[in-house]
Amino acid sequence: MLNNKEYLNRLFESDKPLIIYKVTSGYNIYTDFSDRVLVNKMNIDKFIKKTLNSGKIKNQFFDGYIGFFGYEICCDLIGIKIPKQKNQGFPKSIFYKPQTVIKVNKKILIKSNLKNFKSQKNFKKNNKKFYFKNNFKVNLTLKQYSKLFNQFSKKIRQGETYQIKICQKYRNKSTIDSIKFFWKLMKVNKSPESFLIRDKDYSIISCSPETLLIRNKNQIITKPIAGTLRKNSKTSLQKAKIIFKKNQKENKEHNMIVDMERNDLSRICKKRSVKIEKLKFVEEYKDLYHYVSIIKGTLNKSINIIDIIKAMMPGGSVIGCPKISTLNLLNSMEKEKRNIFTGSFGYIKSNGNMRFNIIIRSLLNYKNICEISVASGIILGSTAKKEYQENYIKAKSLLDIFKP
């Protein structure tokens, strides 16, 4: 019989589907999935009912589903149409029901519904041929980005939107060892909402810093990020706080996003229960600093899980403001599908509690292509060159893991 460390190493070396999720105390790893659901607009009600009933099956350590909603299904659910765009046919949403959960901190703790989960018969050696290049192609040159930037700036001046975020993609031909890449990323950028999904035909690696929602019984919080500052040898956390406070553009952008998220919560929360718990504080990451706020509210009794998803997704801080008109503008002018980018990863438990991030700072490896998507906010006073450079700063920690 394998000990816990040997089992975990064997799991990582195998081709078994698994999910790694960064938690406060370390990492939770989910595997031995008894169910895999491709969620869409037509079956989401059935999926949610199935999730809420999943607690009837004996599983005290995780009675729910974990996975992601891509950008497209988030739009589908609120009636936002997306014109035909370039795409690889990647699924809109996939959720998994784990039978084994491994908690990794100072110790490795394992709980499983399966009696023989450590059996070596359960592990098939991963024989995939991994290869990757560290040169990436960008889907928008500065000239192309500037053209799109100018078109959106015109829409802002005309009052159709106040802020909008253009998606830019970095791509290369690769089939990566997602486990090795994920731990390499965690060594340098251990963001609070980091995760990995490894399945038979795709993998996702993310160092997302942004929590979209945490629902615990009738309480819900959101933690929007709006404002980015590049790190250099002269900056410090204290200096970043001063720079953000003095930066009119960043403050204007942040205020708009906070107001929008308050509005989103107000649609599902009791009157006068939505409060700003913490306004405009700074978080530090490997290559940058972020400007962050925390907002909370008390849910109305009549609100269900789909109401919460519709109100909160896609997360406004990575789309723009106002949300609906901005989504329509983005979808009419962006030529490629966003796939996972600005969707949400997380879990729904059988008691209705849920946690979801916003999928940013993320890499999708599918059909031998690695795709990193980023976006920065345009408001009046923004410049194309600066926003284009900000996109690179946001992608940098993921681009760096391809370096030898």
Image: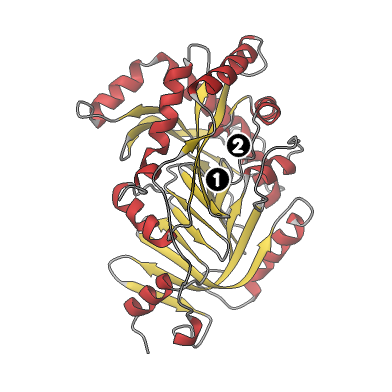
Residue 401 vs 66, above or below: the answer is: above
Tell whether 155 sits left or right of 186.
Answer: right
Residue 20 x/y as whole percent:
45, 61
* Figure check: 391 above or below 131: above
Counting from the top left corner in percent of width and height, residue 234 is at 20, 26
Gap in angstroms between the C-alphas marked 2 and 1: 8 Å
User: Which residue is tagged 2?
Assistant: 265
Asked which quadrant contains residue 179, the reply is bottom left
Q: Position of residue 353 (x, y in %)?
A: 57, 56
Residue 119 shows up from this direction: no
Q: Quadrant of residue 285?
A: top left
Residue 178 found in image quarter: bottom left
Q: Residues within 10 Å of mark 1 (few under 14, many from 20)?
A: many
Asked whether residue 296 appears in the rendered view, the answer is yes
Q: Amino acid at mark 1?
A: Ile
Instruction: Say what secondary structure mark 2 lies in.
Output: helix
Which quarter of the rendering shows the N terminus? bottom left
Disc 2 residue type? Leu
Taking depth in this image into account, of 382 and 224 the one nearest to the observer is 382
> Contact (CB < 8 A) between labels 2 and 1?
yes
- Colouring scheme, one of rainbow, by chain, secondary structure, one colour: secondary structure
Residue ranking furthest to the left: 234
Answer left or right for 120 relative to 317. Answer: left
In terms of depth relative to the viewer, which is nearer, 319 or 16? 16
Q: Position of residue 70 (x, y in %)?
A: 62, 47
Q: How many marks?
A: 2
Circle 1 — which element? Answer: strand
Residue 220 shows which numbered tag?
1
Residue in the picture at 30% in, 51% down? 404
Q: Earlier in the sequence, mark 2 or mark 1?
A: 1
